[in-house]
Image (cartoon, rainbow, N blue to C red):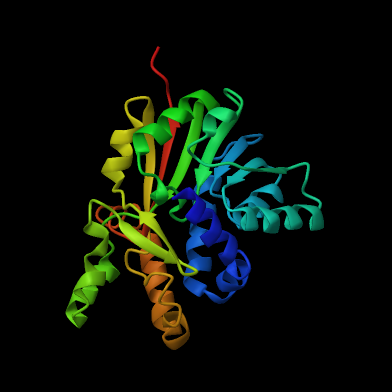
Amino acid sequence: MYEAINEAFSRQSESFDDYEERNETLKWMRSITHKHILRYLKDNDTILELNSGSGIDAVFLGTRGFRIHCTDIAEGMMQKLEGKVHRMKLSNFISFQILSFTELNRLNKNSFDYIFSNFGGLNCAVDLNYLFRQFHNILKPGGRISLVIMPPICPWEIALVLRGKFKTAFRRLNKRGLLANVEGIRFPTYYYSAHDVREALGPDYKILDIQGLGSISPPPYMENFPKRYPKLFKILTLTDEKVSRYFPFNRFADHFILTAEYEPRV
C-alpha cells in the first residue's frame, strides 16, 4: 500500500503547489490550521511533521524561527521540499527525511516538543493505536500534538444525497475504508472521528482543543465555488471560523484539528 502512496503523491508533487495557489478553500483551511498551531506552539519548540508533502507548512514555520523535521514517504514531495529549503536558505530550521509514520522508532527518543500532521495524511493509517504508541518514545513529556484528520461525517458531502449522489454522500461511513484515487493510483483511506482519535491516544494525552475545518464552507474539491459565489464564500468561511470550536461543527466537517498534550502516567 505504501509503495502506491509514494508513487501517487510523488506524481502529484509536480502540480501540488500550483493547485493550492489556485484553490481558495484550501488556502483558507491552511491559514486556519496555521493560526491553530501557533496558538499552541511554544518558543523554541522542535517540531516533527508527519506527511509534510512539498513543505508548505514547514516553510511557514521555518520562516518564523521554528525548527522542524519533515517526514514523508513520497520522494517527489521531498524533492520539492529540498528545493525550497535551499532556495530560501532555511537549512538551519528545516530538516527532512523520507520516512513512513509506521517507522517513527527510527527517530531519536524524546527529541520533539510538538508533532504535527496536516490535511488527512494520517487517514492512510490502518491502525491509529500503533501509530500513537510510537509517539511515546519521540515526544517529550509535556509535548503537544496537532493532527488534522478527515472524519466520517462531512455535512457538504451528506447533502449530496439531495442530488441523488448517494455513493458520494455516504462514502466516508464505510468502516472498511475507501479507495482514494490520486493521479490514477488507488490506495485505501480510512475516516476517523474525534472520538476514534481520543480513544487511540489513550489516557496519557489531555485534549486541549478540537476545531472543525469546513463544516459550513464547501470542501476544497469544489474549487469553483469561491469563484462563482465569492460573497457567499466569504460569509460561509467567516461563519465557519466563529462556530468551529463548538459541537457539532468541531466534529462534523471536511477535516478537524485535534490538539492534545502528552502527560505520561508515572
Q: Residue at 38%, 81% (x, y): give it.
A: 232
User: Vertically, is 263 above or below 190?
Assistant: above
Q: Furthest-bottom residue in view?
A: 228
Res. 55 in view: no
Q: Is residue 24 above or below residue 109?
A: below
Q: Residue at x 24, y 75 (%)?
A: 160
Spot occupied by residue 178 in the image (x, y as percentages of width and height): 31, 59
Q: Nearer the viewer, residue 159 or 39?
A: 159
In the rendered structure, the answer to whether residue 218 lies left or right of residue 27 reads left
Q: What's the residue at 37%, 70% (across, down)? A: 217
Q: Which residue reaches farthest top?
A: 266
Q: Specify the quadrant that holds the C terminus.
A: top left
Image position, residue 157 (x, y; %)? 28, 69
Q: Left or right: where does residue 230 sit relative to residue 108?
A: left
Q: Residue 128: percent from the left, percent from the top?
A: 36, 38
Left or right relative to 225: residue 8: right
